[in-house]
Image: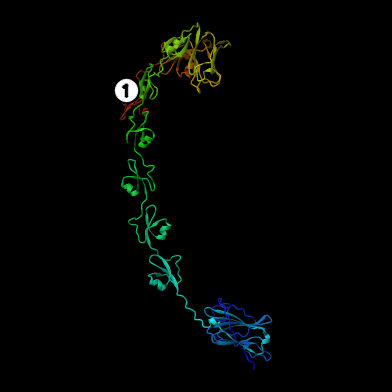
Amino acid sequence: MLKPRTLLFALVGVLAGCGWFPCEFGDLIPGFPVAPQTVGDVSPDNTPDPNDPALDPPAASAAPIRVRLSNPTTRDADCRITMELIGQEVHFSLRRILASTDSLVIGPDQADIVRIEVTFLGAPPIVLDVQILRSGEDFEPGEIIDVVLALPPDDSEQEPPPPPPPLTGACCYPDGTCETLTEADCAGSDGDYQGDDTVCDPNPCQQPTGACCYPDGTCEILTESDCASSDGDYQGDDTVCDPNPCPQPTGACCYPDGTCEILTESDCAGSDGDYQGDDTFCDPNPCQQPTGACCYPDGVCEILAESECADSAGDYQGDDTFCDPNPCSQPTGACCLPDGTCETLTESDCAESDGDYQGDDTFCDPNPCPQPTGACCVDQVCVATNTQAECDALEGDWYEGETCLEFLCQSPCEGDTLEIFILSDEYPSETTWELYEQEGALIASGGPLADVLTMYAWDVCLDPNLCYDFTIYDSYGDGICCEYGDGYYELYVNAIFVGSGGEFVYDETTAVGNGCGQLTGACCLEGGTCVITTAEMCSSEYQGEYYGDGTTCDPNPCPQPDPDPEGACWLDGPSCRVLTEAECLALEGHYSGDGSDCFIEDR
């Protein structure tokens, strides 16, 4: 009988999880491949499988290798036994060796290497990799190799694993905070346990509420987090909105007198003010200001606020004052009367006196007023002058009150007389004129003119049997009216108007003379004035009424205006009376015009 070998391994342990095997075993170790040649397996409780060929008596010629595993420790062990021949695995077996038991593993007939890998179960598992033999020459037929499993020295007396930690969960406090505790610790802290494995993130606890103040002063009951997300100001847990604890917004409050004060809307309403809105300001003042009469230095009156009046350099007359009647002191100045005298008056008084107001703060010394003019005949030519002194300087004959347009100087002509009147523009040197017989001979000419805006007059003798062409020239090509002064010319034959003009380019020609076949007659103008002219001139130039060829103005055939015309005068009520304009204005009525009547459509 062969002596069995007994191998007691002083095994070196490596702590590395569960190694090749799972940490818990309920049956044969799963996860390992099973080779077709596997023999000798038993169930995890070491009960032999009756169908295992390894249990059959060996053949006479066979000498299988057998390994007996003994586990004297207090831990169960899972063992993987591998037997190889020339580098090829020919047999492996998985066995669970319970504590204080042993097991026999029967292998093949031959093997070069027998390897045992052991995992001791427990906490933590211990994985041992053990090589037993390296040479098949060491084996004898039928030999039993005894292997005694042993824990590493420092693990042989290891204490049982500690119990698992107690279960924890979220614990909610009355203030809404959350802490992870055991159920017992939560109860001891007056908390509300939410259950095992519940968490505090996100917080599952009911949050306390309080007053939340918004920027517009409104209040709402919210949690602190909801208040913050709404841009509110949390007032604290259990605070309330009634009464409202929130600061109220303020704005400009306008009072009836135009002053401004920063108040809340409710305080403004309580002060009879007009609230302009939240966050409005009093600088600049947004309030409607009271108004009154504002007097300017020129006597003009305007309704303005006091500040606007001051900004306009006016004199404020007080709130609710009016400009009608005008309360302002009127400026005065020189007023030129028709007779050339000067008087210091207000502009309105000057107008009532038929004067010509010279402007505010003008003076009568020296006298600024134009003196009466008259006709001055110099060598049978009428020259417009301002005074007799000027006429005397020209050695002319002075006819006060006459004008060159209406006064005919003594003519030396035995036939017809052509009167030529030209008012120069601002460029008199550009103006000349010529008079030709229509047969071609030059009869007379004048210019260039010398003085700006001055009236010139000439008398030219005409043959009553001929027709003449009068031509006026402007060398610049812009006529004598109206861009550079209101110049014009007028032509009269024997005091009868025959032509006029001023707006032309380089020249303009007018046919004159009784030989031209022009027929004349009386032409009545508005206001009852009568002039002798042609029918065409009466209509186009005078807009008058032509009385027929050969009619005269002596006696005057033109209807004269009523010296005291009447019309509809509308008084308060309303009532209407036919009165003169002066009578109507004396009654402070509205005069509708001369000849109007009291029908309602005339008002």
- Which residue is more in the foreground, 354 or 367? 367
Which residue: 34% across, 55% down? Answer: 245
Q: Quadrant of the N terminus?
A: bottom right
The answer to whether residue 260 is left or right of residue 66 is left
Quadrant of the rendered structure where residue 572 is?
A: top left
The quadrant of the image that shows the C terminus is: top left
Residue 90 can be seen, yes or no: yes
Q: Position of residue 420 (x, y in %)?
A: 50, 13
* Relative to 388, residue 356 above or below: below
Q: Residue furthest front?
A: 154
- Residue 148: image x %, image y %? 58, 86
Q: In the image, 269: left or right of 155? A: left
Asked whether, in this view, residue 340 is left or right of residue 93, the answer is: left
**Vertical placement of 237 versus 392: above or below?**
below
Q: Residue furthest top?
A: 414
Above or below 396: residue 206? below
Picture coordinates of residue 437 (x, y %)?
56, 11
Q: Secondary structure at mark 1?
A: helix
Question: What is the x, y in percent for residue 72?
Answer: 55, 86
Q: Which residue is mark 1?
A: 583
Q: Quadrant of residue 43?
A: bottom right
- What residue type is disc 1 on? Glu
The one of 287 and 39 positioned closer to us in this rendering: 287
Graded by Cα atoms within 10 Å as few (under 14), some (14 to 19) or many (20 or more), the crowding at tag 1 reads some
Quadrant of residue 289 within the rendered picture:
top left
Q: Is residue 408 visible?
A: no
Which color scheme does this rendered protein use?
rainbow
